[in-house]
Image (cartoon, coloured by chain):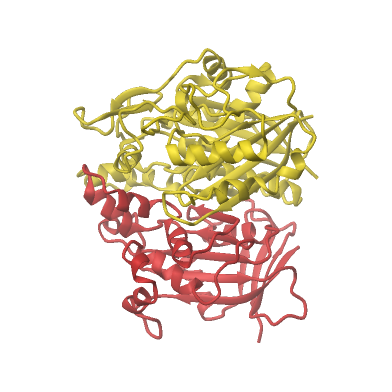
Amino acid sequence: MFERPVQSADACFPDTAGMPATDEIKAAVPRRHARRMSDLGRLVYWLFRNDPPEPEDAIVYATTFTEARALEAYLESLPHASPLAFQTSIHPGAVQQAMIALGRPVRTLLPLAGEEDLFTRMCLTGLTQQSGRVFLLTGEERGDRLLHHGLASATTWALCLRLGPGSGEGNKRAGTLRWERTSTARENDTATPPPSATEIARAVHRRTPLNLPTPMGGTVYLTWTP
Amino acid sequence: MHSYLEAFDCRTALGDADATVAALLEGRVALRLLPVNTDSESERVPLAARGDIAVTTPPRWWDDLTEFLATAPDDDWGSPRKPVLLSSSNFGIDRLYAIGTGATPDAEANTWATAHGIARRLRRQFGWGPNLHIFSHACVSAHLATAAADTWLREGVADKALVVSFDYVGPFVSSGFHSLKILNSGMPAPYADRPTGSVGLGDGTAWAVLSNDPSQWRIEGSSHWNELHHFTANDPSGSGFEQVIAPLAPLLEGHGFWIKGHGTGTLDAGRLEAECLHRAFPGVPLVSWKGSIGHTLGSCALVELVLALRAHESGSIPGTTGSAAPVFAPNVATGNFDAAPARSILLLCNAFGGAHGALLVSHV
């Protein structure tokens, strides 16, 4: 069994009820960095800014479509390709932009892509790391032109789970992330697809417990401290 | 517990691993000066492709990739104890280039544009189960997938792992590197001390089977470091190059080894890498082969790992193709050398954001 305490869980859906506005997020980023960053990069900065990763922590970053607006800007610049848009569009640009703005190196950055089981795969990857803390970070950036092609998210959002070291017994915790490997492995695709990362982010924001069957066998449990 | 490289192969513009090593030992250069994008009048830059570069649906590389992956050992890949770790920097990104240059919406064609679209097609083609993990971190993508497979084997959550990586050259990426001015009309000469730096881009794909069952190549350890100093430039102190080798340096004491560096042909990064490695490991030969096969981007760590293993097994290590004196440090090997004194290989890769990867393998 792999288990870590969840020190904090922060989700942000900008410009929705109870959430900061996009402009507020942008204003929090040092100006010299903000203008070169994507919406998702600034959002990651917002989530990291009060308790950012230390150099020996690990970040596992998961996104399906990454920075759609940056990709669109790059495509619009063709055939005279924009170097800034190219740089900004490269996976995993958002987390790199945020960490550059924070002035922080980090030893381990594991960017994941894809769609199926993305949140679950992020949890498995994070739980098997030996680093002190593990930051599980997932998010998307709303697209425009690419959204019409089915190649972008319809909303901008991000979620960060800070996992503490070890099992964290006795420490204050917001919850627990645990992977129990059992014989009930999800060996084949199920008729009902697992929830999307966006749906999971909203569930985490509501502090809804999660049981996610994993393709590596067993189940990932996210539980919350009352 | 260690993991071992049980089986592996790669493909470059020069052919499979054996053919590529043979060509590198002869000093052959696969790179050719070709138009940077689909406009035949655009600047000619060094590209090493397996066939014509064209934006097509399906992608021009799909048959090449699947034909190559069919050579991997058959197993219950994608089942709970046998994950597939897929990595690429670009996947089918040239579908976006097509959209950017006027292609009309086409849901079926657009499935080629995403990592998950490619992964679904590969699963269908090869019957892989859902235990498939996709890593994408520009030019350290394949390193991270290999290191993750090693971690999962050491942690006992997998019995075997199939690591797959690919990147094929296309106008989306070549236009981007061209905009950064590091892809230009010059041929790359990694670690050469010259006035202008340049890179070449190449097609590359590789697979490797990692297992806990002992075989002749053992993974001793891996390391990462992310400078996050600047999006495209390294920290000028060279700290990233030092940080990534630091955890592995104790494992190298008393070992004969050689170094396969990242060495794309850019000046600043090449100088920092060569000088750092000379300070840390004086006299240990350093090579790069990107002056011949080009930079195969997200696949480079696995492609070049396979080439390094095959070269070592052949007894001769190809020197830094395309480069000649003066070079940035005396450890840069421009000629071929004998593998025999060495038992281990240190393999390095870098990516945007000052990302670094290091892998140490030993012949047992």
| Horizontal relation, residue B93 to residue B237: left or right | left
Q: Is residue B159 visible?
A: no
Placement of A114 over or under A141, stated as above or below: above
User: Looking at the figure, which quarter contains the N terminus of chain B?
Assistant: top right
Q: Who is closer to the viewer here, A37 or A199?
A: A37
The answer to whether residue A42 is left or right of residue B343 is left
When asked about the image quadrant of residue A204, the answer is bottom right
- The structure residue drawn at horizontal position 73% and vertical position 59%, both measured from the top left corner, is A181
Residue B148 % position (x, y): 64, 48
Instruction: Locate residue A32, reporting x and y percent.
Output: 34, 66
Locate residue A36, reporting x and y percent.
Answer: 33, 61
Question: Quarter holding the C terminus of chain B?
Answer: top right
Q: How many numbered markers are drawn? A: 0
Q: Is residue B43 left or right of residue B270?
A: left
Q: Position of residue A102 (x, y in %)?
A: 48, 67
Q: Kindly identify the residue that appears in the image at 56 percent across and 15 percent down.
A: B25
Query: Which residue extends farthest top?
Result: B26
In the figure, the shade used to draw chain B is yellow
Please state which of residues A12 and B286 is positioned toward the viewer in this rendering: B286
Above or below for B4 versus B187: below
Residue B73 relative to residue B354: left or right:
right
Residue B146 visible, this orientation: yes
Near-viewer residue (A74 or A102)? A102
- Rendered colour, chain A: red
Residue B294 quadrant: top left
Picture residue at 59% right of the left edge, 45% below the top = B357
Image point (44%, 19%), residue name:
B29
